[in-house]
Amino acid sequence: MYFGWFSLVDAPSATGHLDPDIPWPVLVSIGTNPTFDNAERTVEAHLFDFDDDLYGRRAVINLERQLRPQRRFDSIEALTAHIETIARDGRQLLESLGWTAPGR
């Protein structure tokens, strides 16, 4: 799991609150999802405080730091709890950087 910054390469988002010139904080998972026995490598990005459809859009993600290595969890509940902890830690990092979502 990584923390980084997401930027659109094409036009602003449909709701207008994701400007290509303003990087947006993101959690990124890169790997095979071992908890689900998936062998296919994927990249999954979760943008903080953002709810818009970005499928098919062109973007760049700059990874800033690794938060934890990939690992297998014993259950979906354990994975979910861990993701919530990482999201909380990511929010604390954002607060320490003084970041707030535009329009909030």
Image: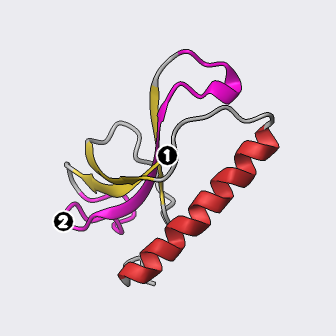
Give residue 14's quadrant in the image: bottom left
Q: Secondary structure at mark 1?
A: loop
The residue sitting at 63% across, 25% down in the picture is 34
Between 51 and 70, the residue placed more toward the observer is 70
Three-letter amino acid code of the residue under disc 1: Met
Between 19 and 33, the residue placed more toward the observer is 33
Name the spot of residue 51 as percent of width and height, x first: 51, 59
Numbered mark located on residue 51 in the image: none
Name the spot of residue 1 as percent of width and height, x first: 49, 45
Q: Give the extent of the magenta segment.
A: 12-39
Residue behind mark 1 = 1
Residue behind mark 2 = 21
The residue sitting at 58% across, 61% down in the picture is 87
Between 71 and 45, the residue placed more toward the observer is 71
Q: CA distance from mark 2 to mark 1?
A: 25 Å
Q: Is residue 103 visible?
A: no
Q: Secondary structure at mark 2?
A: loop
98 horizontally vs 50: left or right: left
Three-letter amino acid code of the residue under disc 2: Asp
Dot 1: few (<14), some (14–19), or many (≥20) neighbours within 10 Å?
some
Residue 15 falls within the magenta-colored stretch: yes
